[in-house]
């Protein structure tokens, strides 16, 4: 048992390392392409004067850097699957593409990445140079992708139970579909709102995927743990170039795909109730947006925060961008540790 665990842990580290170095290697070509074709960020000034003032210096910085993350993940998973088909005795242990654990998160990762890529391009080349509106994503795009995942879980995998820490298994029947869709939509929306400062979303997501990788490993879902490790490796490489001052931004192709994928992994590990802790920063970021919108709607334009999401509020109060990002990373790490402890004790 100990030897098997050491082997599986080594497998995760090896593939995560390969993912990291592959992403580092691919970055110069990606950044050259993004700068050459001027696929840069637009800073919208109407209805958001504080945001525009804080971020006008970033206009023109390339977006769609999320291609590096999901592209690297896709390359690694396909290459080792192909190698396992050609030389099974040598590479079968490094293949982690399985119907039960990784094909669904990979599928939604790529589907959401393509939708996000279209959204990014609409924001750059569209008629009004604006991407999909928040309500389009919240009530159309995210639910459509989540609905596919919910159907797969309920119909293909026969899942209709949830794990409640310190209580056990609870059968909820077809309500599982509703819960699944809500989880995916909320996670995708939250990641999108968090992606607003150099390095912020990348760091928070690296912590979240690492945490769910640990949970998957403890549960014996080794292929899923490897998948989390590969995404984590690609995220760290992305973060290398995304920390202040960022060479490129994640874009919707990154935030949308990673948000949807994280939600699916939370459901696959039956640990979605830990998301508010493991993804604590994601929750408070999206929560601040919803509170701000509700306040302006119900209180005749009065705001709770100087600007939303919450990281912009602290920027508006005079905090340097790097201080906001680093403190949010610390909070994310502490809360994820608490979430992991509760999850492992309550299994």
Image (cartoon, rainbow, N blue to C red):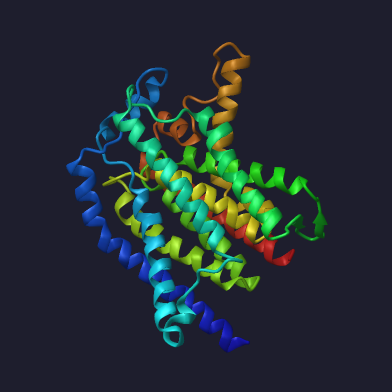
**Furthest residue toward left:** 36
Query: In the rendered view of the protein, which quadrant contains the C terminus?
Result: bottom right
Query: x%, y% of residue 206?
Result: 46, 57
Q: Total of numbered circles in the picture?
A: 0
Furthest residue in direction top, as rendered: 300
Identified at 47% across, 66% down, the residue is 229
- Identify the residue at horizontal 71%, vertical 54% (top origin): 154
Task: Classify residue 299 as left or right of residue 258.
Answer: right
Asked if residue 88 lies left or right of residue 20, the reply is right
Placement of the N terminus among the 4 image quadrants? bottom right
Position in image of residue 60 (x %, y %): 24, 35
Q: Which residue does the image show at 26% across and 56% down from the upper left? A: 27
Quarter of the image where one finds residue 131: top left
Residue 207 against residue 8 in the figure, above or below: above
Give the percent coordinates (x, y) of residue 270. Answer: 68, 59
Q: Can I make out residue 77 in this image? A: yes
Q: Which image quarter: residue 86?
A: bottom left
Q: Nearer the viewer, residue 334 or 234?
A: 234
Corner quadrant of residue 345: bottom right
Q: Is the residue 116 above or below the residue 345 in the image?
A: above
* Residue at 74 percent of width and 63 percent of height: 346
């Amino acid at each position: 048992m100990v030897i098997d665990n050491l082997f599986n842990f080594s497998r995760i580290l090896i593939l995560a390392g390969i993912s990291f170095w592959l992403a580092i290697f691919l970055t110069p070509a990606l950044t050259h392409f993004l700068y050459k074709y001027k696929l840069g960020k637009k800073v919208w000034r109407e209805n958001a004067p504080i945001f525009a003032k804080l971020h006008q210096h970033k206009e023109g910085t390339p977006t769609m850097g999320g291609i590096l993350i999901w592209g690297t993940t896709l390359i690694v998973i396909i290459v080792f699957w192909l190698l396992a088909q050609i030389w099974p005795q040598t590479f079968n242990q490094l293949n982690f593409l399985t119907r039960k654990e990784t094909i669904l998160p990979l599928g939604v990762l790529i589907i959401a990445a393509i939708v996000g890529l279209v959204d990014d391009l609409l924001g750059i080349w569209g008629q009004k140079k604006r991407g999909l509106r928040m309500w389009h994503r919240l009530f159309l795009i995210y639910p459509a992708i989540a609905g596919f995942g919910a159907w797969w879980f309920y119909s293909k995998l026969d899942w209709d139970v949830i794990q409640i820490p310190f209580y056990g298994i609870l059968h909820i029947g077809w309500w599982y579909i509703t819960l699944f869709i809500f989880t995916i939509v909320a996670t995708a929306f939250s990641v999108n709102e968090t992606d607003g400062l150099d390095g912020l979303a990348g760091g928070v997501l690296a912590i979240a995927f690492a945490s769910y990788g640990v949970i998957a490993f403890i549960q014996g879902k080794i292929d899923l743990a490897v998948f989390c490790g590969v995404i984590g490796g690609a995220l760290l490489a992305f973060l290398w170039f995304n920390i202040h001052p960022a060479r490129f931004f994640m874009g919707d192709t990154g935030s949308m795909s990673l948000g949807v994928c994280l939600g699916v992994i939370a459901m696959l590990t039956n640990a979605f109730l830990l998301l508010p802790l493991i993804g604590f920063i994601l929750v408070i970021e999206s929560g601040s947006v919803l509170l701000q919108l509700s306040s302006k709607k119900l209180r005749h334009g009065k705001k709770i925060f100087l600007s939303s999401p919450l990281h912009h509020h602290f920027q508006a109060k005079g905090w340097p961008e790097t201080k906001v990002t680093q403190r949010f990373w610390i909070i994310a790490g502490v809360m994820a540790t608490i979430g992991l402890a509760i999850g492992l004790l309550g299994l």
